[in-house]
């Protein structure tokens, strides 16, 4: 692992630590768990599994990749690996991590991991949420595209695809729950701000 790759990997690990630290802080603030993926009636089993697989494997794969260096031939790595991809990926990881972390902080007591009717926080529609209804997911997707640029191989491509699919599935579930829980204010918000980025 060259120094730029090592720094990129470290940025990802720091983001993970930040995510869990902010989630713990939010739970402490509201006085109950904000981790809603495990609820049996949430219908979130598939996106929850994909998120766990994507993030856990992304934390484990780069060191394994180094340990296996030279032991296998990956066509994507042969085609895409290089300094330009490392620099691009490093920037994307930093930008994505910042977007996701700042957006999570901005949610404050409304932060939840997953969703469930009756357990949503208050509607947050300012700050990063004024230009995206899902800026945390946008940041995480950018981060994973950056990881693929830094570690271009079939495994990382699969992990990036898993995160993109998980975000897509989870957003559809969350929209249904938020419409049911928050009603007209959330529908008005949907009419103003795009699902991923931009205003309507």
Image (tube, helix red, strand yellow):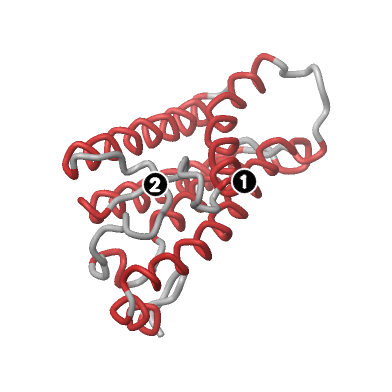
Query: Is 111 on the left-hand or right-hand side of 51?
Result: left
Q: CA distance from mark 1 to mark 2?
A: 19 Å
Give residue 105's position: percent from left, percent from top: 24, 49
Location of the N terminus (image quadrant): top right
Residue highlighted by disc 2: 113
Query: Is 89 on the left-hand or right-hand side of 18?
Result: right
Give residue 60's position: percent from left, percent from top: 57, 24
Query: Is 180 on the left-hand or right-hand side of 84?
Result: left
Q: Residue at x 26, y 67 (%)?
A: 123
Q: Residue at x 19, y 36 (%)?
A: 28
Dot placed on the residue nearer the N-terminal end, 1 or 2: 2
Give residue 113's position: percent from left, percent from top: 39, 46
Asked if 169 appears above or below 156 in the picture, the reply is below
Q: Secondary structure at mark 1?
A: helix
Q: Residue at x 39, y 54 (%)?
A: 136
Q: Secondary structure at mark 2?
A: loop
Give residue 41's position: percent from left, percent from top: 50, 51
| Res. 160 mark | 1
Q: Quadrant of residue 84 in the image?
A: top right
Q: Residue at x 44, y 70 (%)?
A: 197
Residue toward you, 4 or 121: 121
């Amino acid at each position: 692992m060259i120094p730029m790759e090592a720094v990129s990997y470290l940025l990802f690990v720091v983001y993970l630590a930040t995510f869990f630290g902010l989630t713990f802080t939010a739970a402490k603030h509201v006085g109950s768990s904000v981790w809603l993926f495990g609820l049996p009636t949430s219908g979130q089993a598939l996106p929850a599994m994909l998120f766990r697989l994507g993030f856990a494997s992304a934390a484990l794969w780069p060191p394994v990749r180094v340990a296996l260096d030279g032991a296998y031939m990956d066509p994507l790595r042969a085609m895409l690996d290089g300094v330009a991809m490392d620099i691009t990926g490093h920037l994307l990881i930093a930008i994505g991590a910042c977007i996701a972390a700042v957006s999570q902080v901005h949610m404050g007591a409304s932060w939840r991991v997953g969703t469930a009717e009756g357990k949503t926080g208050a509607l947050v529609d300012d700050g990063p949420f004024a230009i995206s209804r899902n800026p945390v997911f946008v940041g995480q997707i950018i981060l994973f595209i950056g990881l693929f640029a830094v570690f271009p191989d079939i495994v990382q491509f699969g992990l990036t695809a898993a995160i993109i699919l998980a975000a897509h599935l989870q957003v559809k579930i969350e929209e249904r729950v938020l419409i049911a829980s928050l009603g007209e204010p959330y529908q008005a918000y949907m009419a103003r701000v795009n699902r991923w980025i931009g205003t309507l």
